[in-house]
Image (cartoon, rainbow, N blue to C red):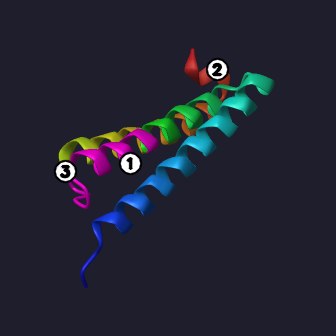
Amino acid sequence: MMRSPALVGFVAGALAMGYVVASLFFLRFWRRAREGLFLAFAAAFGLLAGAQGLQVFAHGDRDWDGHVYWTRLAAFVLIILAILLKNFPRRLRH
């Protein structure tokens, strides 16, 4: 099945926009609550938006290029670490 480069770019741009919107929502929640988990989620979605933009402008349809893969991996590791730190009791972190 042939993929149109214009369609791939459109869908990738829509995904990047969705990531940016999610990041802005989490930033708004962080401003209200000052909870570090929201800030980590905002940063992770910002990384995902950047990876999506990098993929479109650099190579198009190739998902497994190193810089895109590592950027996505960093975003997911950031989310996992933020959740783990949120769920550990404070006495274990000191």
Residue drawn at 66 percent across, 29 percent down: 89
- In front: label 2 or label 3: 3
Which region is colored magenta? 49-64
As for residue 52 lying within the magenta part, the answer is: yes
Residue 64 placement (x, y as % from top left): 22, 56
Q: Residue at x 64, y 20 (%)?
A: 91
Badge 2 amino acid:
Arg
* Residue at the farthest right position: 32
Decide: marks 1, 3 in contact (CB < 8 A)? no
Camera-nearest label, 1 or 2? 1
User: What residue does disc 2 label?
Assistant: 91
Residue 82 is situated, as x and y percent measured from the top left of the image, at 55, 34
Give the residue at mark 3: 65
The count of marks equals 3
Picture coordinates of residue 51, whole percent (x, y): 36, 43
Q: Quadrant of residue 49?
A: top left
Q: Is 78 rendered above or below residue 15?
A: above
Q: Quadrant of residue 21?
A: top right
The amino acid type of the residue labelled 3 equals Asp
1 or 3: tag closer to the N-terminus: 1
In the rendered structure, the answer to whether residue 26 lies left or right of residue 66 reads right
Q: CA distance from mark 1 to mark 2?
A: 38 Å
Q: Which residue is mark 1?
A: 52
Chain-order first, disc 2 or disc 3? 3
Query: Circle 1 sits in a helix, a strand or a loop, which is it?
Result: helix
Farthest top residue? 94
